[in-house]
Image (cartoon, helix red, strand yellow):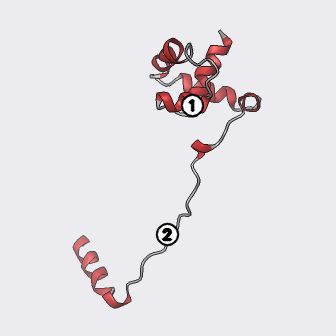
């Protein structure tokens, strides 16, 4: 059955009529380039949900400990985007790490 569909499809397309397909998806800009104003972001109603979700990640404690012991003492005013880049984590997790540092 499957081979029949493949063979039939191949026969129905002639080489002279083949045209390149147009991409149906438009290029989207990466959201990693968005600058986040943390003060505005903390006022968002979903911020507490973001923090709770990030903290439920099993790797969160290790990443937070490493950041607090090695990265934050050297660069205390690091941005969430920069911290995310250094630890290879999402910006949301970096925000949660920085938020937990501020609440202590």
- What residue would you read off at disc 1? 82
Image spot of residue 90 (x, y percent): 53, 34
The front one of 46 and 70 is 70
Please state which of the two labelled residues, at mark 2 or mark 1, is closer to the viewer: 1
Q: Residues within 10 Å of mark 1 (few under 14, many from 20)?
A: few
Question: Which badge, 2 or 1, comes first in the chain's sequence?
Answer: 2
- Badge 1 element: helix
Q: What residue lies at 34% left-to-right and 90% top-to-bottom?
A: 16
- Give the numbered dot on residue 6: none
Q: Are marks 2 and 1 in contact (CB under 8 Å)?
A: no
Image spot of residue 6 (x, y percent): 27, 75
On-image quarter of the C terminus: top right
- Badge 2 element: loop
Q: In this view, which residue lies farthest toward the front?
A: 74
Q: In this view, which residue lies farthest toward the bottom?
A: 16
Q: Residues within 10 Å of mark 2 (few under 14, many from 20)?
A: few
- What residue would you read off at disc 2? 23
Q: What residue lies at 28% left-to-right and 76% top-to-bottom?
A: 5
The front one of 10 and 94 is 94
Q: What residue lies at 64% left-to-right and 42% top-to-bottom?
A: 34
């Amino acid at each position: 059955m499957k081979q029949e569909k493949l063979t039939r499809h191949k026969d129905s397309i002639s080489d002279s009529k083949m045209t390149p397909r147009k991409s149906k998806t438009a290029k989207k800009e990466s959201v990693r380039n968005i600058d986040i104003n943390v003060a505005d972001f903390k006022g968002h109603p979903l911020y507490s949900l973001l923090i709770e979700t990030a903290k439920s990640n099993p790797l969160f404690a290790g990443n937070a400990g490493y950041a607090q012991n090695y990265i934050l003492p050297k660069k205390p005013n690091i941005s969430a985007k920069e911290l995310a880049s250094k630890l290879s984590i999402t910006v949301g997790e970096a925000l949660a790490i920085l938020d937990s540092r501020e609440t202590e």
